[in-house]
Image (cartoon, coloured by chain):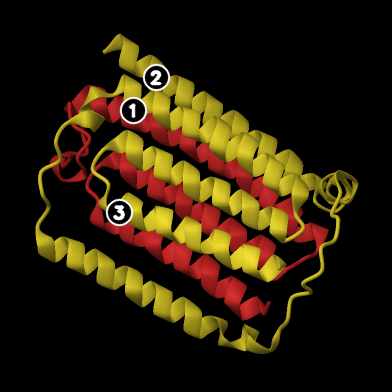
Amino acid sequence: MSAYNLAALSFLLFALAAAGFLTCGSLVRMLMFLELMLNAANLALVALNPQPASQAYAVMLFAIAAAEAGVGLAILITLAANFKTLQAENIKELKG
Amino acid sequence: MIAAAVYALGALAALATLLMLFQRNPVKAAMLMLTALLATAGIYLALSAQLLAALQIILYAGAIMTLFIVALTVLPQAWRDHPARAPFIKVLGLAAAAVILTELVQAAAALKTAVRPTGFSETGALALAQQLFGRFAFQFELLSLVILASIVGAVALAAKRRDA
């Protein structure tokens, strides 16, 4: 099992999630793909270095991902209340 | 054996992410995301990161997925029929992702000679805790500030909504 193959695997997961983030219009779905991108980055971190230090970093990234999901969903709820839509192309004003 | 498990679980995660792209029902998309996250937990297990596999299931598959399901339940807007986006935007997005993938794979060419040990070893909670509370103690404490800030931010956003 070469490190290159493991890196390619995590890059593939990242690119697929990035494709979803760029093509879908729904904000909830974009947040889901964002989490998957972070997950792929985490996988690369663990796969490329078998030391405990990289796993410690991965644990910290878990906490970052949880914080990101919490704030992101709070923003989505506020956007849904203000704009009555969750399609990215319908949200055009900066001043709610 | 371990390499085969890693590749099979990686293919499962990639397949689930790919199906998510074409899934219109948001809850089914969330279930596919859950599949991808659980497959990643399996990869962690195969890569001898047992504690991370457990944390992945508890945090990602447990907490974050529940948050998404609750958000889908609370937000009726997420269920509305999505208007079809212009096809050229989709093509543009897919092309951008393909460019990202090519660039990343090319940048990783230096890794071709590196070989990861395939044996199954045990990275216990003790080794991880020694890193978190020894070498990375400052970063770990800083992380609690990040989480506190995110809690305050989320509560402030939700409270503002109640006034309006």
Q: Label 1 crowding class (10 Å Cα cut-off): few <14, some 14-19, many 20+?
A: some
Q: Is residue A18 left or right of residue B48?
A: left
Query: Spatial distance from mark 2 to mark 1, Cα to Cα?
Result: 16 Å
Q: Which label is found at residue B72?
A: 1
**B28 or A20: nearer the viewer:** B28
Subunit of label 3 = B
B96 vs A17, left or right, is left
Q: If you read the primary sequence from the N terminus, does the residue marked by circle 2 or circle 1 appear first?
A: 1
**Can you give x and y, in whole percent of width and height, for residue A23 in the image?**
24, 57
Which shade of the palette goes to chain A?
Answer: red
- Label 2 crowd (10 A; few <14 / some 14-19 / many >=20): some
Which residue occupies the foreground of this view, B114 or A31?
Answer: B114
Kind of residue at disc 2: Ala
Chain B colour as displayed: yellow
Question: In the image, which is nearer the foreground, mark 3 or mark 1?
Answer: 3
Mark 1 residue element: helix
Q: Residue at x 70, y 41 (%)?
A: B54
Could you tell me residue B56's position as x and y percent? 63, 43
Mark 3 — residue?
B21
Position of the C terminus of chain B, as image quadrant, is top left
Query: Which residue is drawn at the image coordinates 66% and 77% (left, top)?
Result: A3
Amino acid type, label 3: Leu
Q: Which residue is mark 2?
A: B158
Whether callout 3 and callout 1 share a subunit is answered yes
